[in-house]
Image (cartoon, coloured by chain):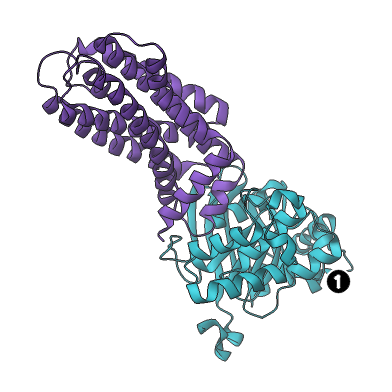
Chain colours: A cyan, B purple
Amino acid sequence: MLWNDPANQILRPSAITITALSRGSLLRRCTLSVPVGTRLLVVSDPEASASTLVRVLAGLSRRDGGKIEIAGMADGSGRGWSRRVAHLGPEPGIPRWMSPREAVALAADLLDVPHDEASTRTDRALAWAGVTSAAADRPIHRGGPPLLQRTGLAAALIADPEVLLLDEPLRALDTHERTRLLRLPGQRHTIVIASRYPASEAGLVSHVALLRAGQVALMVPVSELDEAGLPLSMLGVKALADRLVAAGRADGPRIAAAAQ
Amino acid sequence: MSQSLLVARVALRELWMTFRLLILLVAFAGGSAVVVLLPTSPAVTLDRVALGLGVATVVASAVAAWTLAHERAAGRAGWLITRSVSRVTYLGGWLLGITIIATGGIAASAALAWLITQGMAIDLDPAAYWVAVIAVATTAAAAITLGLAVGALLAPVPAAVVAAALCALSGAAILLASGGSTSVPGAGYLLLSRLASPGQVLPDALRAAGVGLIQTAVLFVIARAAMERAEL
């Protein structure tokens, strides 16, 4: 894999590049670059902006304007980056009459996972998501929202995506289990999490971005919050953004510096 | 298996699990069942079959609209789209799924009506009859595509109402404006009802089947444009 090349550990190419992205009043010429391997928490004011950004990246919402490049490709179709990206929303729209195994196998079929690998990968993904073998063959509706969300995660991971777009994921699970599942192994996964509860993402993310009035007001490593003595919360992120503005540090250079 | 067929398979199972498959089959086969229960003259029999299929076509359009709108609202359309399925493939899969059921219902209804007419003093041209049935099926596919276009834009209940209204009104308008001519879209139903009358029906039925296919293609382009703009 090109992204595993040692040179890229230094160069850190961009996994996601968003240029002047607009969507109604929630995203206004939003520009952002997310380097490979970054685990980015996106919070926003208004709250719906972060979720809208993730939905636009996933192709669920249309953009009014702007450009998106993922893995260097601007084409979001099956021939472009769509197979390299996975999305997991708050309520995965998996038919409830399916069993988890059927749902994940369907995802594997749709994503053209080779037939000889599909079964092994399905078992592995279900095991990773904590779906027991007994639950794997029963209709999802019998397991309620927790089983639905675990199945959604397994289906999202089946094709080993390079970019994972998460929108308030796995809220039906307890915090400990949720953190365990979302701490994906490997360095090359780029993860973008839209969340209204930043504190619950502690330990999962390396960077945090704040969208204000539809634009990126801040993107910094989470460690900067610690250095400033601020918590990973909406108030903490907003306070850091205010301090940087008050200190006269322009947003653009700040964002660029954080991305290096 | 191609993505369209996978989506169609999911669509068929979704319709089966939610009893909508049954509604469609009953709607299409119901007309012929009524004919069986109420035997009458050959001309009236065919009139009733055509009317029953017309009503079922309106029901199919409404079911298609409600279904797509509900799939969007429930996030199931979005889940498939984020599994690398393009919006047009998704739309095509659902069109295929619903059309398979409608075609099955129309075939059952037509077969039943054919068997009934065989017991009557009527000399039906089999080729003309079945081509007229195919013309009805292509018009039903167009109505389903219309429903999908509406379902891509509206919430479930308004989508079903608007699709049914559009379908019924356009059918009535064409019927009134045609003045009995069979060179209009949706003429398959008229031709079916006229099979008991003397005269060549086959050429008109072939034309009607072609017009139905063109209607479906044009409406699919419109439905695709609506789907591309839909929030999933």
The reply, left or right, for residue B103 in relation to residue A109 is left
* Quadrant in the picture for residue A221: bottom right
Q: Chain of mark 1?
A: A
Up the image or down, B215 lies above or below A94; here it is above
Pick the residue in front: B200 or A195.
B200
Residue B179 placement (x, y as % from top left)? 20, 9
Question: Which three-letter amino acid code belongs to the residue tagged 1?
Answer: Asp
* Quadrant in the picture for residue B45: top left
Q: Residue furthest right?
A: A229
User: Which quadrant would the C terminus of chain B be assigned to in this image?
Assistant: top right
SS assignment at label 1: helix
What residue is at 48 percent from the left and 72 percent from the top? Answer: A115
Residue B170 placement (x, y as % from top left)? 34, 19
Q: Is residue B38 visible?
A: yes
Crowdedness of circle 1 by 10 Å Cα count: few (<14), some, many (20+)? few
Residue A142 placement (x, y as % from top left)? 74, 50
What residue is at 56 percent from the left and 57 percent from the top? Answer: A57
What residue is at 65 percent from the left and 56 percent from the top? Answer: A99
Pick the residue in front: B59 or B200.
B200
Pick the residue in front: A106 or A185.
A106
Identify the residue position indicated by label 1 in the image: A226
Pick the residue in front: A131 or A191.
A131
The reply, left or right, for residue B40 in relation to residue A115 is left
What residue is at 39 percent from the left and 11 percent from the top? Answer: B38
Up the image or down, B17 lies above or below A100; here it is above
Q: Residue furthest front?
A: B119
The reply, left or right, for residue B139 in relation to residue A22 is left
Q: Residue furthest bottom?
A: A6
Residue B90 placement (x, y as % from top left)? 45, 49
